[in-house]
Image (cartoon, grey):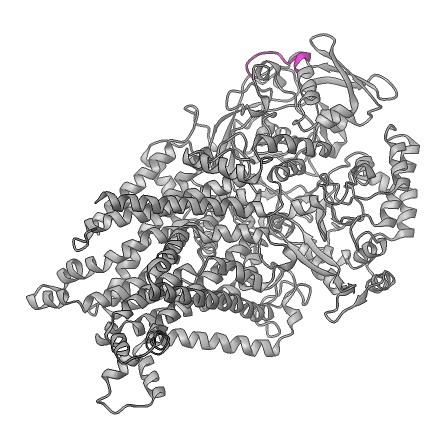
Amino acid sequence: MQKSFKLISSLFVAAMLMVSAMSFAQDLPDVPRNQTLILGWDLSAAVVGVTNPWALPGYTHQRGNAFLWEPLSYYGIFKSEEIPWLADSMEYTSDDFTSMEIKLNPMAKWSDGVPVTSKDVVFTFEGQMNNQTLPYHAAFNQYVESVEAVDDLTVNVTFKIPAPRFKFEVLTLKFDTGIPIVPAHALEAQEDVNAFPGGLDMPHSGPYNLVAWDLNQKIFDLREDWWAVEAGRIGVPEVKRIVMANIGGQQMDNIAQRIVNNEMDAALDMRSSVIKSIVEQNPMVTTHSGDQPPYGYLDWWPNALWMNTQLEPYNDQRVRRAMSLAINRELLDEIIYEGAGITTIYPFPLYPALQEFADSPAVKALEEELQPGLYDPEQSAALMEEAGFTMNRDGLWEKDGETVSAIIQGFEQIHSDIVPFLVEMLRNAGFDADVNFGADSYQNMADGVAGLYMFGHGASLIDPYAALELYHSRYSAQIGTSAGNNRFSRYANPEYDALLDEMAPLGADNPRFQELAAEALGIYWKEQIDIPIIQWLHRIPYNQTYWTNWPTADNPSLGENGAFWAHTGMLVVTNLKAAQ
Amino acid sequence: MSSVTLSNTAIRQPNKVTLFFRYLRRNPSLTFGLLIMLFLVIFTVHGLLTINTKDAYPLAVRPKMPPSFQYPLGTDFFGRDLYAAMVIGMWQTAVIGVFAGALGTIIGTIFGFISAYFGGFIDAAITSICQILIPIPAFLIQVIIAGSIDKRSVTILTMAWVVLLLAWMGPTLVIRAQVLSMKERQFVSVAKLSGMTSLGIIFKEILPNLLPFIAAAFIAQVFQAVFASFYLAIVGLGPVREPLLGNTIWSAQTQGAFFNGWWWWPIGPAVAMILILGSLALINMGMDEMANPRIRRSE
Amino acid sequence: MNFRLLSKRLLFLLMVVWAASTITFFIPRISPKNPVRERFAELARTGGFSPEDLEVIVADYSQRFGLDKPLLQQYGDYMWGILRFDLGISLNKFPKTVMQLIYESLPWTIGLVFITTILSFILGNWLGALAAWPRSPDWLKNIATSFVLFQGVPPVLLGILLIFFIGFKLKLLPLGGAYSIGTVPDQSIGFFLDVLRHQLLPGIALVLGSVGGWVISMRGMGVTIQGEDYVTFAEHKGLGPRVIFRDYYLRNALLPQITGLALALGNLVTSAIVVEGIFALPGLGTMLNSAIRSNDFSVIYGIVLFITIGIATLMVIVEFLYPLLDPRIRHQ
């Protein structure tokens, strides 16, 4: 026995030696807990230690890289305000949205002391235009004619066609979209910018340095010489160190337990029932809506049941409508969300500007007429019979011996609370429903397989154009090809396209734009292009034991949301106040 | 068994049932295991006769109710009657386990026999295939396969097939080793001398003696199958809508049942799973005793 | 240890590697998915990606990863790479190589799986031997039996219960992670102890689940040994029960068990994959799990291959160690 104990202990020591051989760059100073922010996030799902935004497909701005990279402008969604950042201003210089002038902040500097100049902006833009693997290559190609540095701080952009939304959609960082500015002097030297990982030493403009990482955690330390403080953009951040701790693979309720035990200050968003228990069990934890339902804020990703409208039998409007009529939205609100009205009939999130659109008389009248949220099993059955289906022995609709495949493709981590209910509702109405939470569900959506896809509309934020444009026929790829993200319906309708084409060059405050948008929404409802189900909420627990001043409904800060992983995560962190 | 009764012929032979019960008295783990198993079977059969199948699926009853007279095991977040879910789950879990276990064992037994009986090239081929496949982690392969199947065709039975694919090598090697050792035993030589055919020897002499080993291999397979179906549920594969025990435990976990104070949700299926597998393990241990004549001698 | 046997075993090892790599290579290819597209589609889901580009990008990267070549050529390249210990580049975590990723996550898995395997081996065999030993008290036999019952509890479930009761309610041990959040790894005793504390709960979950198997097999083995002539002889020589238990009985019964050790390690890896996730340990299992979820082929087969080769190698090593432990066996 003794021998074996020796064996164990030597094995253990050997294993430990391997652990400590892991890569930590330098000796780190000690930072006390009350100056450290601990965030729980899944580090296992992507590469850790890549900091170059152009290293693709490994890079993601999530997992802390958003603390390193800054844009020309941020957008504070809950205040509906632009937050100028590297740029002091960014204005269209013509009425038809075909040219733009960008003026940079003269104080802006990279972390190695080199100033941020128009050269970097031009480099960033031209990179997107020339390097086809970069995420906004297509947008730049479609819109941008030329980019020109007028002087060190001024850049002029000329567009090929009117681009009223380019500034917001591409050049402004908000949620998970937009581009940051990258340092020309660091990337120019690289032979293949897509293969350059960046590492710890990559010059960046954001307030934190990545100082250490392994698969268990990433550590970011505050940079004392951050330009934005000197430039008066923001006060000196109180968070001296950010530790992003890996929670990959761990179950949500275990993460909830760690938050209740004050191990972490915030972690990714929770299901409705879990966050309620967190708030109840630890009074120091709050949420966007305090201790009241819905315990979270509105995200930009309202979920619908999408389907491939080119495929039998979903190409029949009556079948789509019958499915929608089988969904009891009121019951969902009651059971899952404790009565908070989370279900929706819109393909866009109801942010202030969009709420206004939804409340406009034209839209209200359409809603009254078309009843997009109606639950009526009898009408559903009548439509199915009209479409030529008969009820078979198992109580399922059948035509030519085939039941209606209503397998819902979804994602277990975020959909495990709602999809089982949808499946049962559809089954009760005679649709052959089931659920697939497998690793292949996303691919199935993109491939347009038979069935329903639980997925969001990550599109509109300040006007309905982007959401409505998802159904433009230019994205309606043939069956057999892969559909683009958020564009699974493959819907084609010339009348609808015409409306969208007329909207494209118009600004959102144009009355004609509003008129056309209402008309398009009417077609969306009438045709039941997809079945809108719920607004998407981020329910992020904020632990106030060490940090206060989290962005909440009562304390909107700059208008950023609390998603510390999103592009605006840097604003969340730098606005926190120490509690102790 | 025959070898044991052979040595006892001098004494008056009690009937087989009495012998069996006497034996059970001396083998507590087997007894205990069988009793639990019997209880589970009665529970499931009784349940299947009384419940409404629909109650085992969402939206059937009022959700989140603790155990009460009306719902003896409570109801879950999705509005399933957990008693109904457990009865159906036990039945489905048993189907997967028994199906995959039985087929794996049968295939293993056949290959083991062929290998040991014919020897030579066939033996070498079968054993090396087994030995080469055994170090490959079966679960990983199952995940890859289960992920590639069309979801609409994933049923309880396809699950069993997936589990089965890499579950026959163990029994093959065990049975082969036992047949080899038995070939050399006296009773086989005696049978050969007395002019029995090969098939006769296999079915009349060797197979009965192998039964405890086959049973043990079977139990080990059932184990693997139930675990595999649970693990597949954890990675989101398999028939997720069905109230398999593993699925119910996992859906309780994904909704934070413990943390939210719905303790009754995962407890039932977890206890059921432990009882099924634990009783099998006990029976396995008891079988070992039966298969090993020396244990009997020492008692 | 002669040359023929050695080459025979090496051949076996090669065959295992070949079989494992072939299976892992072909099974994912049967399905019509394109991992590159899936990766970019996921990027598109979380970040702004204009989808019109997707096909262009996919084609570009498919070329970079060699996915556009004929299947057989890919297979050949892949096999050639394996012979050079090159498992390729991760699709999902580009530009990292698979070997880099394995190296980053391996220590956590080795620490957990190795130690728990050996602990459960010792505990299980000891209990099994005692259970079969006629002189041991009844309560000990009962403990052994209850461990057999524990076999029925999936380690994942145990892990969840342990986290909730011991970690969350009693606050005795950490709820997850490889070491305390914010600690900077170093070579100090303090850090080792911290890591150990974090491995305790997952370790217990894995050990409790796997002790039973050893108990059953050791018990059977022990009973057989008791009937051997040398044990009877030792008894007649008048040796004390302690000496007989340790030198004659335990030692001989343990030998065949060692063969099972390498295989048990393989079984435990399966459990560890899921258990690591529950405890947010960034080991091979977690890496594999995320690779499976993102269809990162090269990482999936890299890890499967790595584990398989590890197990097969251990089996071979054990076989060679065997004659050293048991003087009766000599390889001819």
Examine the image and state in which quarter residue B146 appears. Answer: bottom right
For the stretch drawn in magenta, what is the main secondary structure? loop
Is A78 drawn above or below residue B224 in the view shown? above
Q: Which one is in front, B62 or A385? A: A385
Is residue A114 found inside the magenta-colored segment of the image?
yes
Examine the image and state in which quarter residue A121 appears. Answer: top right
Q: Which one is in front, C200 or A529? A: A529
* Relative image position of residue C163 (x, y in whole percent): 46, 51
Tell me: A50 left or right of B223: right
Tell me: C170 left or right of A456: left
Residue A263 visible in the current orientation: no
Residue A196 visible in the current orientation: yes
* Relative image position of residue B284 (x, y in whole percent): 37, 69
Q: How many marks?
A: 0
* Relative image position of residue A466 (x, y in whole percent): 79, 35
Tell me: C141 left or right of A93: left
Q: Which one is in front, C161 or C52? A: C52
| Furthest-top residue in this view | A151
Is A501 drawn above or below residue C118 in the view shown? above
| Furthest-left residue in this view | C237
Is B70 drawn above or below residue A426 in the view shown? below
Provide the residue span drawn in magenta: A111-120
Is residue B183 found inside the magenta-colored segment of the image?
no
Residue shown at the point (85%, 64%) measured from the top left:
A385
Q: Which one is in front, C183 or A505? A: A505
* Relative image position of residue C319 (x, y in whole percent): 27, 50
